[in-house]
Image (cartoon, grey):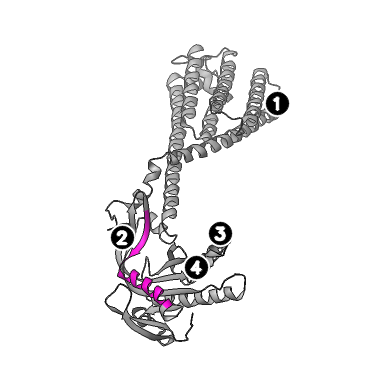
Amino acid sequence: MRPNLREEDPLQEITSFAAHRPLETDLVASLMRRHEVAAERLIGWLRVISGLCIFLTVIVADGIMDGFAPTPTGLFERNAWIASIGFLVLGAASILLAAPQRWRHAYAYLFMTLDVGLVLGIAYAAVGERGLPGNALPSTPIAWAAPLLLAVGALRYDVKVQLCSIALLTLGFVAIAVGLNHELMLGPGQGPGNDPAWSRLFTMPVNVMRLSLLVLAGSATAFGIVRSRRMLASAVRDAVGRASLSRFLPAEIAPRIAEGDAALRRGRRQRAVIVFVDIRDSTSMAEGMDPERLSLFFTAFRARILGSVRRHHGFVDKFIGDGALILFGVPEEGSDDANRALAFAQDLVGIVEAWNATKELPHTVRIGIGIHVGEVFCGIVGDEERMEFTVLGDAVNVASRLEQATKHYRETILASGAVVEGSSGRTAWREIGREPLAGRREPVVIFAPALRDVV
């Protein structure tokens, strides 16, 4: 049956199962949940720090003013104490509640409302109790806490809470200004100062500009939250896609596919060296071995293959039962692919011999290795239910037949003439046959190591 090779983007196909399930949404929601709790705890500590700073500011300000000239600061001090205590209490409460088992999303709206209410309440008192018109609202120190609330609120990464905060602050300041008889223009003596020029700084057009800048600053933080959440969602999608690729593809191939290697996605023809490795008499070995011990044995065997493959810069395309398909020259061909493949085979034989010498196994491990080089198709095959990266072609079949022929020739390694002649170590190999392999009509020149290793 012909493989299902399509022109669609295989990366999209491989990760399509994630698109049909709320995996990314769940991951983002989980991250946001953990972030929300941590952010609220941080905001709580910032409230505590703000309360302490206001407390220390009042003490320092009193000391400085008393040193120069006694100045009545009763209302200022009272409002400062209210702000200090309010932020300390809200901060402590949010820190206590900011734990995964106690925190609820509604608490973010509650604490945001309490923060805004505290600022607006003190602002109203600071202006109204002095008998000033609503124009004087921007002159109150607490009004400058509004940008701080918006900046700190952005730590939540919740745009809905942030928009509510912007709306409450804006409507609150407008309501206070209207309630305290905000005037279009101020006459002498009506503003925070008696100087007409000073009073003009608190006319309606100027205050509207201040309010507009506050709204724009808050909108900028809301836009930053939206952008950050989109970046997080994109990062999660990319991570899910790469994780999906790593499930289906070899580690050497997955990054290339993820980075957009179109040729590997669609599949391509290229020259490659193919190596098949198989354990001899694995059925009889498994017959008398405990299943758990057998699993440990195959794990150890595969680990030795992987270590040797990496040293010789190839990669394992797949493990097949008690064997492995190994490639050299994929995805990029090299002039020394044949040399590295032959060196790998001899290195693996030495590793297995050393393993047998430890006497830790109940049976002697014997392997067969077949090596061939030729043109192959390499790419992603399959459909959405099951995809994999593989190599296809006659060269793959020849390598497999050579591995099987090691039993007949009683050799550990058999390589085709194409591989040996393409290497720089021709003298280290001897020709032992020239015949068609099983299922083939054309003869293949067969080589084995010059130093014969009978199995």
Mark 2 or mark 3: whose residue is earlier in sequence:
2
Residue 282 is labelled as 4
Segment tinted magenta in the rendering: 387-407
Q: Amino acid at mark 3?
A: Pro
Between residue 406 and residue 181, name the one nearer to us. 406
Q: Amino acid at mark 4?
A: Ser
Q: Label 2 crowding class (10 Å Cα cut-off): few <14, some 14-19, many 20+? A: many
Q: Amino acid at mark 2?
A: Gly
Q: Mark 1 sits on what residue?
A: 62
Give the Cα distance between marks 4 and 1.
Answer: 89 Å
Q: Mark 2 sits on what residue?
A: 267
Between residue 266 and residue 32, name the one nearer to us. 266
Helix, strand or loop at disc 1?
helix
Q: Mark 3 sits on what residue?
A: 291
Q: Amino acid at mark 1?
A: Asp
The location of residue 175, given as percent across then percent down, is: 48, 15
Mark 3 or mark 4: whose residue is earlier in sequence:
4
**Residue 56 position (above or below residue 412):** above
Tell me the mark number nearer the camera, choosing from 2 and 3: 3
Quarter placement of the N terminus: bottom left
Mark 4 or mark 2: whose residue is earlier in sequence:
2
Helix, strand or loop at disc 4?
helix
Give the Cα distance between marks 2 and 3.
Answer: 38 Å
Give the Cα distance between marks 2 and 1.
Answer: 78 Å
Mark 1 or mark 3: whose residue is earlier in sequence:
1
Q: Is residue 86 magenta?
A: no
**Residue 13 position (above or below residue 392):** above
